Amino acid sequence: MMKRMMIAMGLAASVLGSTGAMAALSAGAKAPDFTTRGALAGKTFTLTLSHQLKRGPVVLYFFPKAFTPGCSAEAREFATHIDDFKKAGATVIGMSADPVDDLVAFSTKECAGKFAVASAGPDIISGYDVALKMRPGITDRTSYVIAPNGRVVFVHSEMNYSGHVKSTLAAVQSMKAK
Protein backbone atom coordinates (compact mmCIF):
# COMPACT_ATOMS: atom_id res chain seq x y z
CA MET A 1 0.00 0.00 0.00
CA MET A 2 2.74 2.49 0.98
CA LYS A 3 4.73 1.62 -2.14
CA ARG A 4 1.66 2.29 -4.33
CA MET A 5 1.14 5.68 -2.65
CA MET A 6 4.78 6.63 -3.25
CA ILE A 7 4.51 5.63 -6.91
CA ALA A 8 1.28 7.62 -7.29
CA MET A 9 2.88 10.67 -5.64
CA GLY A 10 5.91 10.35 -7.93
CA LEU A 11 3.68 10.14 -11.01
CA ALA A 12 1.66 13.14 -9.88
CA ALA A 13 4.82 15.13 -9.29
CA SER A 14 6.22 14.25 -12.70
CA VAL A 15 2.96 15.15 -14.42
CA LEU A 16 2.64 18.45 -12.56
CA GLY A 17 6.28 19.23 -13.10
CA SER A 18 5.99 18.67 -16.84
CA THR A 19 3.22 21.25 -17.15
CA GLY A 20 5.17 23.89 -15.31
CA ALA A 21 2.31 24.13 -12.81
CA MET A 22 4.44 23.94 -9.66
CA ALA A 23 6.68 26.71 -8.43
CA ALA A 24 9.74 25.86 -6.37
CA LEU A 25 9.49 28.92 -4.14
CA SER A 26 6.87 28.54 -1.47
CA ALA A 27 5.49 30.90 1.13
CA GLY A 28 8.27 31.88 3.52
CA ALA A 29 11.06 31.43 0.96
CA LYS A 30 13.48 34.29 0.32
CA ALA A 31 12.80 35.77 -3.12
CA PRO A 32 16.02 36.06 -5.14
CA ASP A 33 16.97 39.68 -5.78
CA PHE A 34 17.73 40.62 -9.38
CA THR A 35 18.40 43.51 -11.71
CA THR A 36 17.12 43.45 -15.29
CA ARG A 37 15.81 45.68 -18.03
CA GLY A 38 12.14 46.50 -18.11
CA ALA A 39 9.61 48.74 -19.79
CA LEU A 40 6.84 50.96 -18.47
CA ALA A 41 4.53 52.85 -20.83
CA GLY A 42 6.92 52.19 -23.71
CA LYS A 43 10.06 53.47 -21.97
CA THR A 44 12.91 51.20 -20.91
CA PHE A 45 14.53 51.32 -17.49
CA THR A 46 16.60 49.22 -15.12
CA LEU A 47 14.51 47.28 -12.61
CA THR A 48 15.92 45.94 -9.33
CA LEU A 49 13.58 43.91 -7.14
CA SER A 50 15.07 45.10 -3.83
CA HIS A 51 14.46 48.73 -4.87
CA GLN A 52 10.84 47.95 -5.70
CA LEU A 53 10.35 46.24 -2.33
CA LYS A 54 11.34 49.45 -0.51
CA ARG A 55 7.97 50.86 -1.63
CA GLY A 56 5.92 47.90 -0.35
CA PRO A 57 4.88 44.42 -1.43
CA VAL A 58 5.52 43.33 -5.01
CA VAL A 59 3.34 41.11 -7.18
CA LEU A 60 5.87 39.46 -9.45
CA TYR A 61 3.99 37.58 -12.11
CA PHE A 62 5.68 35.45 -14.74
CA PHE A 63 3.96 34.91 -18.07
CA PRO A 64 5.02 32.79 -21.06
CA LYS A 65 5.07 35.15 -24.06
CA ALA A 66 4.04 38.71 -24.87
CA PHE A 67 1.19 39.19 -27.32
CA THR A 68 -0.20 35.67 -26.99
CA PRO A 69 -3.93 35.49 -26.17
CA GLY A 70 -3.68 34.36 -22.53
CA CYS A 71 -0.75 36.65 -21.69
CA SER A 72 -2.42 39.66 -23.28
CA ALA A 73 -5.67 38.94 -21.43
CA GLU A 74 -3.79 38.57 -18.13
CA ALA A 75 -1.93 41.86 -18.66
CA ARG A 76 -5.17 43.68 -19.47
CA GLU A 77 -6.78 42.24 -16.31
CA PHE A 78 -3.83 43.39 -14.15
CA ALA A 79 -4.09 46.83 -15.80
CA THR A 80 -7.82 46.99 -15.07
CA HIS A 81 -7.19 46.29 -11.37
CA ILE A 82 -3.96 48.26 -10.93
CA ASP A 83 -5.65 50.91 -8.77
CA ASP A 84 -6.78 48.17 -6.36
CA PHE A 85 -3.21 46.89 -6.11
CA LYS A 86 -1.90 50.41 -5.51
CA LYS A 87 -4.57 51.01 -2.86
CA ALA A 88 -3.28 47.89 -1.08
CA GLY A 89 0.26 49.30 -1.34
CA ALA A 90 1.53 46.79 -3.93
CA THR A 91 3.58 47.19 -7.08
CA VAL A 92 2.80 44.85 -10.01
CA ILE A 93 5.65 43.67 -12.25
CA GLY A 94 5.17 41.28 -15.16
CA MET A 95 8.12 39.07 -16.15
CA SER A 96 8.78 36.94 -19.22
CA ALA A 97 11.74 35.62 -21.16
CA ASP A 98 10.86 37.98 -24.01
CA PRO A 99 13.53 40.49 -25.03
CA VAL A 100 12.92 43.96 -23.61
CA ASP A 101 12.33 45.34 -27.12
CA ASP A 102 9.19 43.17 -27.37
CA LEU A 103 8.12 44.22 -23.88
CA VAL A 104 8.32 47.92 -24.77
CA ALA A 105 5.32 47.54 -27.11
CA PHE A 106 3.58 45.11 -24.72
CA SER A 107 3.91 47.61 -21.84
CA THR A 108 1.98 50.18 -23.84
CA LYS A 109 -0.55 48.08 -25.71
CA GLU A 110 -1.53 45.32 -23.29
CA CYS A 111 -0.44 46.78 -19.93
CA ALA A 112 -1.91 50.17 -20.90
CA GLY A 113 1.19 51.85 -19.45
CA LYS A 114 -0.06 51.07 -15.95
CA PHE A 115 2.65 48.69 -14.69
CA ALA A 116 6.12 47.52 -15.63
CA VAL A 117 7.08 44.39 -17.49
CA ALA A 118 10.63 43.11 -17.51
CA SER A 119 12.84 40.55 -19.19
CA ALA A 120 13.59 37.44 -17.16
CA GLY A 121 16.96 35.98 -18.10
CA PRO A 122 18.10 32.44 -17.33
CA ASP A 123 19.29 33.28 -13.78
CA ILE A 124 15.93 34.84 -12.84
CA ILE A 125 13.99 31.98 -14.42
CA SER A 126 16.14 29.45 -12.56
CA GLY A 127 16.03 31.36 -9.26
CA TYR A 128 12.23 31.47 -9.30
CA ASP A 129 11.94 27.99 -10.89
CA VAL A 130 9.54 29.20 -13.55
CA ALA A 131 10.98 27.50 -16.65
CA LEU A 132 8.22 25.97 -18.71
CA LYS A 133 9.36 22.35 -18.72
CA MET A 134 7.85 21.52 -22.11
CA ARG A 135 9.17 24.68 -23.83
CA PRO A 136 12.69 25.65 -22.73
CA GLY A 137 13.40 29.37 -22.91
CA ILE A 138 9.84 30.31 -21.94
CA THR A 139 8.48 30.87 -18.44
CA ASP A 140 5.43 29.20 -17.00
CA ARG A 141 2.62 31.27 -15.48
CA THR A 142 3.42 31.80 -11.81
CA SER A 143 2.51 34.76 -9.64
CA TYR A 144 4.36 35.58 -6.44
CA VAL A 145 3.43 38.10 -3.78
CA ILE A 146 6.63 39.22 -2.10
CA ALA A 147 6.61 41.14 1.20
CA PRO A 148 8.89 44.17 1.69
CA ASN A 149 11.26 41.95 3.72
CA GLY A 150 11.89 39.90 0.55
CA ARG A 151 9.93 36.85 1.68
CA VAL A 152 7.36 35.14 -0.54
CA VAL A 153 3.96 35.33 1.13
CA PHE A 154 1.78 33.88 -1.63
CA VAL A 155 2.22 31.75 -4.77
CA HIS A 156 -0.25 31.01 -7.55
CA SER A 157 1.16 28.69 -10.22
CA GLU A 158 -1.29 27.69 -12.93
CA MET A 159 -1.06 27.98 -16.72
CA ASN A 160 -4.63 29.28 -16.95
CA TYR A 161 -4.33 33.03 -16.38
CA SER A 162 -7.86 33.55 -15.06
CA GLY A 163 -7.18 33.22 -11.30
CA HIS A 164 -3.87 35.07 -10.99
CA VAL A 165 -5.13 38.64 -10.65
CA LYS A 166 -7.93 37.80 -8.23
CA SER A 167 -5.77 35.62 -5.98
CA THR A 168 -2.76 37.97 -5.85
CA LEU A 169 -5.01 40.96 -5.19
CA ALA A 170 -6.67 39.09 -2.31
CA ALA A 171 -3.22 38.23 -0.93
CA VAL A 172 -1.98 41.84 -0.94
CA GLN A 173 -5.27 43.10 0.49
CA SER A 174 -5.01 40.60 3.33
CA MET A 175 -1.45 41.83 4.04
CA LYS A 176 -2.71 45.41 4.31
CA ALA A 177 -5.56 44.33 6.62
CA LYS A 178 -3.11 42.85 9.14
Image (cartoon, grey):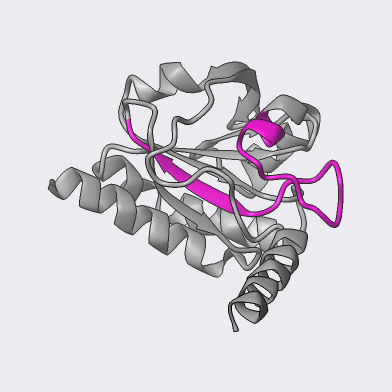
Q: Residue at x 32, y 23 (%)?
A: 55
84, 62: nearer the viewer: 62
Q: Is residue 4 left or right of residue 101?
A: left
Across and down, in percent, residue 167 comes to 40, 61
Magenta region: 124-147
Instruction: Give the residue displayed 64% in from the left and 61% down from the top.
Output: 21
The image quarter containing residue 38 is top right
Residue drawn at (33%, 34%) of the image: 147
Q: Horizontally, is 87 left or right of 112 in the view?
A: left
Residue 26 rendering spot, x and y as whole percentages: 47, 46
Q: Is residue 73 above or below residue 28?
A: below
Image coords of residue 87 (percent x, y): 25, 43
- Given residues 86 and 120, the one toward you in this image is 120
The quarter of the picture where the N terminus appears is bottom right
Image x and y of residue 36, in percent: 65, 20
**Is residue 117 shown above or below 153?**
above
Provide the major secondary structure of the magenta segment: loop
Count all numbered tags in the image, as a single digit.
0
Q: Nearer the viewer, residue 153 or 165?
A: 153
Mark yes or no: residue 156 visible: yes
At a point 33% along the width and 19% down the height, the residue shown is 54
Query: Is 145 one of the magenta-colored residues?
Result: yes
